[in-house]
Amino acid sequence: MKIEICKMQIKDLQKVLDIEKELFSEPWSAKMFVEKIINHESYVLQKSDEQEIIGYICGWKINDEFEITNLGIRKQFQRQGFGKILVEHLIKKVKNENCKIFFLEVRENNFAAQKLYEKLGFKVIGIREEYYNNPKENAVVMRLRLTENDSIYD
Ligand SMILES: CC(C)(COP(=O)(O)OP(=O)(O)OC[C@H]1O[C@@H](n2cnc3c(N)ncnc32)[C@H](O)[C@@H]1OP(=O)(O)O)[C@@H](O)C(=O)NCCC(=O)NCCS
């Protein structure tokens, strides 16, 4: 399967919203995604021939730090390396803009996502109590700090 990663566009919105509803108990609204498309770094990973969206990632730069705010891979495509590809893509891109510290929050019981982030070098740095609703759950805060000698994202 040939894939490509493209900037998320308004034309992708409906497909992204459908995936978001499939994956999350508190899905982002169309309005939230539109803001992310306009003001943030947002990408879709899709099949290059059919332009079928497999997953997406969103994040934003705050000075020299970067927060990953959303990541989703359609259920039927999970565990095939696509989540890792998307996070790596974003990190490489932002790294070139001189951003070396990455943050994210993830549900305490979302072991799949935590494992993925750990694999990419993120470390747990704290807990935000009852950060999520539906169900109420703590957030684990994770951070990746790239060093000068760090070549994994070259
Ligand atoms: C979390 C998520 C993005 C992972 O995407 P993915 O494409 O399935 O992950 P990958 O195939 O790239 O996995 C990379 C590594 O992460 C870990 N991992 C991913 N899913 C896992 C699972 N279900 N159980 C255990 N480890 C898992 C593994 O170490 C895996 O490497 P391996 O397959 O060689 O063992 C995906 O499961 C998803 O969309 N979940 C629902 C939405 C969500 O939780 N988003 C994150 C919000 S913070």
Image (cartoon, rainbow, N blue to C red):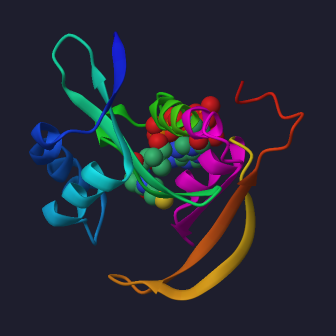
Left or right of residue 121: residue 28: left
Query: What x and y, as percent, mark residue 71?
Result: 41, 50
Q: Is residue 104 above or below residue 45?
A: below
Left or right of residue 64: residue 89: left
Left or right of residue 44: residue 121: right
Specify start and end residues of the magenta stretch as a single range.
91-119
Q: Is residue 119 above or below residue 124?
A: above
Q: Residue at x 14, y 43 (%)?
A: 10
Q: Residue at x 64, y 70 (%)?
A: 141
Which quadrant would the N terminus be assigned to in this image?
top left
Query: What x and y, as percent, mark residue 136?
Result: 42, 87
Query: What x and y, as percent, mark residue 53?
Result: 23, 31
Q: Is residue 109 magenta?
A: yes
The quadrant holding residue 108 is bottom right
Q: Is residue 139 magenta?
A: no
Query: What x and y, as percent, mark residue 75?
Result: 32, 42
